[in-house]
Amino acid sequence: MKTVHTDQIRATVAALLEDACINLPADVEVALRAARECETQPRARHILEVVLENAAMARRDRVPLCQDTGVTNVFVELGAEVCIVGGLLDDAINDGIREGTRQGYLRCSIVNDPLRRVNTGDNAPGVLVVQPVAGTTLRITVCPKGAGCENMSRVSMLSPADGRDGVTQFVLDTISKGGANPCPPVMVGIGLGGDFAQAPLLAKKALLRTIGARNPDPLYAEYEMELLTAINALGLGPQALGGLTTALDVFIETAPCHIASLPVAVCLNCHATRHTTATL
């Protein structure tokens, strides 16, 4: 049995949150540089240059990539042989969010009630997803999610008769309706299957993949590339002002579903796709 104290979890979440908000992931930066080199429209190329300059400034000056430091999503892989001591896991994570917000001078974006709208003043609570796994693994991934891209995400309960074409149309409609709001070029996470609740979770978890990491199932790996091509063919481009790159990548995650339903969710991330992971 492996013992982990909540103080260690709190400190880890705080460090991960600050790092995620400041440092653009290396794979995203590489993809943005490649998009800039391929871009043929001067305005689109300039936007990508500004995005890359912003990332460099954030890293150099230790300031957030974006003023919207978002809802803090925390994904935990919790081993069956891990014993957490010192308190509750969710309390430790929310305390870490508060600490990371103070340390990183992050904007407090969370209100305590959807209608009363009183700011909590510390960016907590976050959204916690715990996945039981075997062994002594305790892996924490922190993913701040801004409202611009989150608000453009969608879920639909399609009919099985809609099939692959229906899914494709729903994805393209989501991107088109989102326009400039999710700050393209975007990352596109797609959840297929499960039920009304599970599909969005699959879509959000899909966004934790590294750019270029295809679904292990050849059917979905090929579909990811097909959708990426179709999305970029829309011509929205950076900030939806025209260009070749509307999306940097598309990731699909699936789950079994009912014979009478085809749940599909599209979760968008802006070009500042922020996530960091630590294993305790």
Image: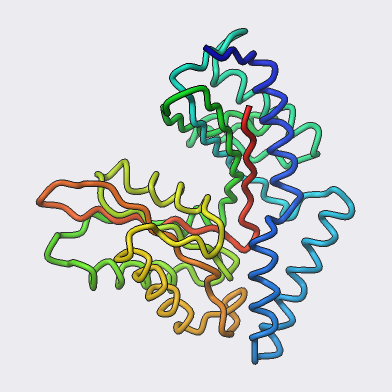
Name the quadrant containing residue 231. bottom left
Q: Residue at x 82, y 49 (%)?
A: 63
Q: Is residue 16 visible?
A: yes
Horizontal side, residue 99 vs residue 246: left or right = right
Horizontal and vertical percent position of residue 129: 46, 33
Q: How is the image coloured?
A: rainbow
Horizontal side, residue 105 vs residue 244: left or right = right
The quarter of the rendered structure image containing the C terminus is top right
* Image position of 82 with respect to 225: above or below: above
Name the quadrant containing residue 222. bottom left
Q: Residue at x 32, y 48 (%)?
A: 199
Is 203 in front, or is 251?
Answer: 251
* Image position of 92 with respect to 260: above or below: above
Q: Residue at x 58, y 38 (%)?
A: 141
Horizontal and vertical percent position of residue 254: 31, 52
* Image position of 102 with respect to 235: above or below: above
Is 136 in front, or is 109?
Answer: 136
Name the quadrant containing residue 270. bottom right
Can you name the residue that lies furthest to the right here? 61
Q: Residue at x 47, y 16 (%)?
A: 81
Q: What is the total number of numbered labels drawn onto the structure image?
A: 0
Horizontal and vertical percent position of residue 122: 69, 30
* Image position of 54 with respect to 68: above or below: below
Is 260 in front, or is 109?
Answer: 260
Q: Is residue 121 visible?
A: no
Can you name the residue that lies furthest to the top here? 86
Horizontal and vertical percent position of residue 246: 53, 75
Is 218 in front, or is 167?
Answer: 218
